[in-house]
Image (cartoon, grey):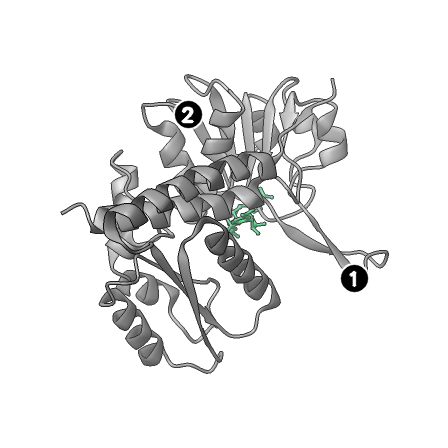
Amino acid sequence: MTARIIDGKVVASRVHAEVAVGVAEYKVKHGTVPGLTVVLIGDDPASHSYVKGKELACEKVGIATETIRREASITQEELLEIVDGLNNDPRVNGILVQLPLPNHLNEDVVIHAIDPMKDVDGLHPENAGLLILGKPRFAPATPLGVQRMLVEENVDMNGAKVVIVGRSKLVGMPLMALLLQKGIGANSTVTVCHTGTKDMAAETRRADVLIAAAGFPGTVTSDMVKPGAVVIDVGVSRVEDSTRKRGYRLTGDVDFQEVSEVASAITPVPGGVGPMTISMLLVNVLLAANLATSN
Ligand SMILES: NC(=O)c1ccc[n+]([C@@H]2O[C@H](COP(=O)([O-])OP(=O)(O)OC[C@H]3O[C@@H](n4cnc5c(N)ncnc54)[C@H](OP(=O)(O)O)[C@@H]3O)[C@@H](O)[C@H]2O)c1
């Protein structure tokens, strides 16, 4: 079997088009456009490149975007003051503090300080709690993107055996919560694996839908995949590659070549989940703007 390649860019462009329509409608109704402010601390090259991608995507769909850039030496108090200012700025519908933060800053304290109604990353405990309770407001963009991709690809998630490798608060946990719920693109039986899982291959081989979010290349090999399974690769790692001008290439957690021979459908890295993450962030910003004006 040679797997169908799920093209994240194609699915993402459909979502972008929907958001652009939603933004245009919002503008007609309110005379203004939704606004996202990103707070970027330090000079991590990957974070700068992610933020650039977010800025460009916002511009394309008509969302107003601003990035507040500060040196890595910023104090916790200074950062909290910035967040407080954004919480109180009515032009700002969504606040995104780009992670990871430098070590001296406490990520949890900063995330908890964001107004939950502007928490478009879905990481505030109020939003994480609502998701677990089956009443999602803002879910993190990457799990939303994975779910949207599965829906767009007509993968039957109802009663499907899903195995997720990884239990982070950003990917694995919220994805588990999304796919467990009743409803379209969900109602699945979900198993979550982590570094404490015994005989992980026995778990993953049961999966109709296998989702890898461990962050290590080679985590999923072909012997771990049930023939005909749908495989979604969330992982993104930089591996040295002297043939590339920039000296590295991006790779996922899944051994793409060999798993493509076993799976029925698979996402590539890059060009799979990555584009979906940005598009679902746009969905969350539009939602935040609509919620802010719905009272
Ligand atoms: N494409 C995108 O838009 C996007 C967005 C977000 C993240 N990512 C990528 O997705 C990957 C995961 O991100 P994250 O933020 O969730 O990472 P993370 O916080 O480091 O979490 C990784 C999870 O994977 C588990 N894990 C690691 N190695 C494992 C192994 N060999 N077997 C079983 N479980 C293992 C860890 O288990 P323990 O809990 O036991 O340590 C942990 O729960 C990274 O490569 C990241 O760059 C991509």
Front residue of 279/60: it is 60
Front residue of 135/225: it is 135
Front residue of 237/7: it is 7
Q: Quadrant of residue 18?
A: top left
Residue 138 in view, yes or no: no
Question: Which residue was labeled with disc 1?
Answer: 247
Residue 20 in view, yes or no: yes
Q: Residue type at mark 1?
A: Gly
SS class of the residue under badge 1?
Answer: loop
Question: Which residue was labeled with disc 2?
Answer: 185
Left or right, residue 162 beside residue 265: left
Q: Height in image: 272 above or below 122?
A: above
Q: Residue at x 51, y 20 (%)?
A: 154
Q: Rounded to the nearest whole Å, what is the CA distance between mark 1 and mark 2?
A: 39 Å
Q: In which quarter of the image is residue 257?
A: top right
Q: Is the CB of the residue bearing disc 1 within 8 angstroms of ligand 1?
A: no
Q: Height in image: 269 above or below 96?
A: above
